[in-house]
Amino acid sequence: MKILSPKKPRNLRLMTGAGKVFKLTILLLSISFQIANAATLKKTESYKVLSYAQKIVKGKVTDEKGAPVSGVNVTIKGTKTIVQTDADGNFTIEAPSSDSILVFEFSGMQDQEIAAGNDFITIVMKEVVQQIDGVVMLGYSKVKKESLTGSLQTLNNKKLLDVTTPTVENLLSGKASGVFVSTSGGQPGGPSKVVIRGKTTVNGSTDPLWVVDGVIVGNASPSMNPADIESLTVLKDAASTAIYGSQGANGVIVVTTKSGKTGKATINFSAKTAVSVINNGNYKIMNGAELYDLYNSFSNKEVFQNATWWTPELRNRNYDWWGNANQAGIANDYNLSISGGGDKFKSYVSVGIYDETGAIKGYDYKKYNGLMKFEYKPNTWLTIRPQVNLTKEKIFNQQHSVGALYRNLPWDSPYLPDGTLVGNAPNPTWVNVSGSNYLYDLQWNFSESESYDVRSNLDFDVKLTKSLTFASVNNYIFGNSNSTSYSDPRSSSGLAVKGRIEDNFSTFNRLYTNQLLKFNKSFNKHEINAVAGYEWNEYKSKFSQAIATGIPPGIIVTEPAAVPEKVEGNRSEWAVQSLLSNVNYSYNNRYLAQFSFRRDGASNFGKNAQYGNFFSISGGWNIHKEAFFNADWINNLKLRASYGSVGNRPLQLYGHLPLYSLSGSYNANPGALISQIGNPDLSWEKTYTAGVGLDVSFFNRVNITFDYYNKNTSDLLYQVPLPGVIGVTSILRNVGAVNNRGFEASINVDIIKNENLKWSVDANIGANKNKVTSLYGSRQEIIVSDGSGVAGSAFKLLKPGYDVDSWYLTEWAGVDPATGAPQWFTTNANGERVKTSDYGEASKHQKVIGSYTPDFFGGFSTSLNYKNFDFSAVFSYSVGGEIYNYSRTEFDSDGAYTDRNQMNLHSGWTRWEKPGDIATHPKATYNNSSNSNRASSRFLETGTYLKMRSISLGYNIPINKLNINTLRLFIAGENLFTISHFSGVSPELSPNFNSGTGQYVISGVATDVYPQTSKITLGLNLTF
């Protein structure tokens, strides 16, 4: 608003008529208002400044690349005077004086203030994500990075959103030190697995805790839109995670979503279209000619030479099962957001659609997201922040059978000469007469599912004093899902029961609230940041299942079914309540200290251990701020140390209770059988972690972080065997201990920083070694399943001094050069290791041979900006560790399996053919009975790999028309190549679902999984 000083009115011409009288009246009222306003201003000391010392300031606003930014709000601080930059970023404003402060605000960019001293001002606006380097979100509070004493890593959305995925956990791979991500296979929407600083358990969950906008959402990654993420912060040590108590043993990932910013409304639109193709890595199955040559090389081919199916024509029969099932998968990812607001009200609203068709035919995945996030300040002491996040996922599954694609013989076609489908086994037209044509069933059978999640918040802050704030987070999550599986009565799976329909329904709701007092005060050289509060978290779910058989073909509802085959249902509940506190103290920003304490009570602890206490204490020293420190080239030098405790709750909700099973019945009456013995002492797994760290920055270009940690976990949750005389064979107890030690390092280097060219490099490395330190009672070792859920694949050994993922196998001794027979090691009467061709004898003398744990792992990336061009590339790697390639027991079986296809010999492999041959593979025979494909260390392979995670090239089109602020076009590639000597599909194993624990695990076993896909993406980002 321009303030006019009282002056004599301009000369007025005589006006007559009603219209002129009206205009004159308006003019006189205007002059009167100005005189009255000036009289009021005259009473203030600033009147003369406003009247006589006004200053015209001009300027231009650009982004860091020099492009003009239009729509920036330019305000005189303390007044309502405001203008906006034009399409070229220019502005003109009238300031009261040269001492006035100009405030520059724009959504998505960092606010700036500057004195109106010069006649022309140039402002360079920085993206708001850079503020993350200064302030870190820890879930319960914000802490200045220079005041941190714990080990954590924050990633902004620019470093995250370089992959086309609907799931949040896939964004982390290769980008944070000490964080191992086993990404999903190529199936759209598939699960991934995150492990932070090694496995602290042998039977419990290894999943980190996820916190979204201050709300603990659990150990499963949140169902949300990755495009709505502002930042991810990975909390690793006790100083960072202890405040999460019995849930923080596996680390914590804090998600901060985008919020509205003060300034003109900003519209962001992004669109990506990706084309995906199957990438089978080094795994190559045989075509018809290769399989024929293998059979022709069998030393006992006389067994089948006179069979009717064995003809030379087989060499030319080559049905490509993979080629028939493959297609160019298409993924479309669209996101639209609107953000803006003023001092009192800010909003962020977004919608997202993700639609992907699998690279293997028959699988469609759709995900819809919506987020509405508001901030309202009705007055100076109250801030209200309502939020609603909605997610819908929809899957249609009529996917070609991945298992059949590996197994089916290339000599067998699914189609008859007339083009009709071959029926199911037995198939007299096939070489493998017992084989099944999955396409026959697939013409009818399918499954489909839908799930809905609604996450709603009503949070508010009450500023009690300048230093004390009451903060309330109140969250309610509701979700439901339904699925239908249909087996047609004409299909092999539905033939015996005349068709089957299975309907599953589940709902859940989760109530979370925390009430916090936050204290933040600085005085003299002291600074205190403290939080204390109460937290409640409860969960309820309900599941029901209905299975019916005897249905007419094509009917996909249960009502017409003749037989109600099965009805099943259950309910689950749990609750946790907590008291928590955290204090951060800083003296002169040199000496830092932190202490946290939390007390948890959980419903799935035993009654004698209902509550647990958790704590952490840590300190830091900003050495570069000391008077004696004179190295000007070092910008930051901080030493950190921490110690504390966290916990891991049982996966079982009722593992502490005595239970009876009512699933049995007699004469139509329900019956009860004891199914579990109660354990009132059941408690959480306890992890005590000590760590030291060093942060170094120098030349304003290089940032390095080092961390070393030692984690001791005791009271491991394990099913201890019991005598089966009472019908119960085990009881869940807290027994045993595990130790994890590790080192992490990360580095960021700005190699070139100037106006036109910027080049930076990031790299991280993590190394973790774990070992079992004790078991229960007098037990010195326990042989366990590998956790893959694949029957007969391999075993692991739990033994003090050994890795949790140690393989326990029969030791392979190679091929006998004289006979071509397989050999293994056994132990003779003198305790010496000797070779034998008797697998049964060798299997009595198994031993620990390697482990799945890698020696070290990490990632590195680079980004380059030249004028309007930008380029980035991200790689991940893992070195060491052995993978058990179970697929080879089937497809590299030396002739043991004649009902399925076989794989080609990998690079460097050879097969024994004649005496004297030094070979990796024994003599191949038809229906081989030498046991050469039985479980042994023969199938252990290196897990080392280097993978190109993503690469992109973008161009920011200079455009100042149509109110467009930025327009970026880009092309990107994902998972384009992996360098590895692993003979399977990928050394980066997808998680396996373990039905025993009900969770996805990284077992170290490679099976015939949905291969990962390579993607080429075209996209654009548009900002109005």
Image (cartoon, rainbow, N blue to C red):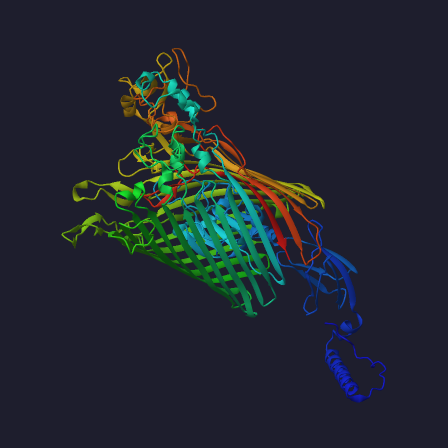
Considering depth in this image, is 371 or 613 the residue closer to the camera? Answer: 371
Q: Position of residue 514 (x, y in %)?
A: 43, 61
Tell me if I can see residue 1007 in this picture.
Answer: no
Q: Quarter-wise, where is residue 801 in the image?
A: top left
- Tell me: residue 1012, above or below residue 891: below
Tell me if I can see residue 622 in this picture.
Answer: yes
Tell me the quadrant of the picture where the N terminus can be found: bottom right
- Tell me: residue 991, above or below residue 101: above
Q: Quarter-wise, where is residue 911 in the image?
A: top left
Q: Identify which residue is drawn at 42% across, 41% down.
A: 711
Q: Position of residue 505 (x, y in %)?
A: 34, 55
Q: Position of residue 279 (x, y in %)?
A: 49, 35
Q: Position of residue 365 (x, y in %)?
A: 45, 48
Q: Is residue 941 left or right of residue 625?
A: left
Considering depth in this image, is 941 or 747 the residue closer to the camera? Answer: 941
Q: Residue furthest left?
A: 667
Q: Is residue 735 left or right of residue 84?
A: left
- Tell me: residue 590, above or below residue 741: below
Q: Residue furthest bottom?
A: 17
Tell me the quadrant of the picture where the C terminus can be found: bottom right
Considering depth in this image, is 952 or 659 the residue closer to the camera? Answer: 952
Q: Is residue 436 left or right of residue 174?
A: left
Q: Quarter-wise, where is residue 525 in the image?
A: bottom right
- Tell me: residue 36, above or below residue 558: below
Q: Is residue 171 left or right of residue 30?
A: left
**In the rendered picture of this protein, how many numbered marks are placed on residues?**
0
Q: Identify which residue is drawn at 35% across, 38% down.
A: 787
Q: Residue furthest front?
A: 418
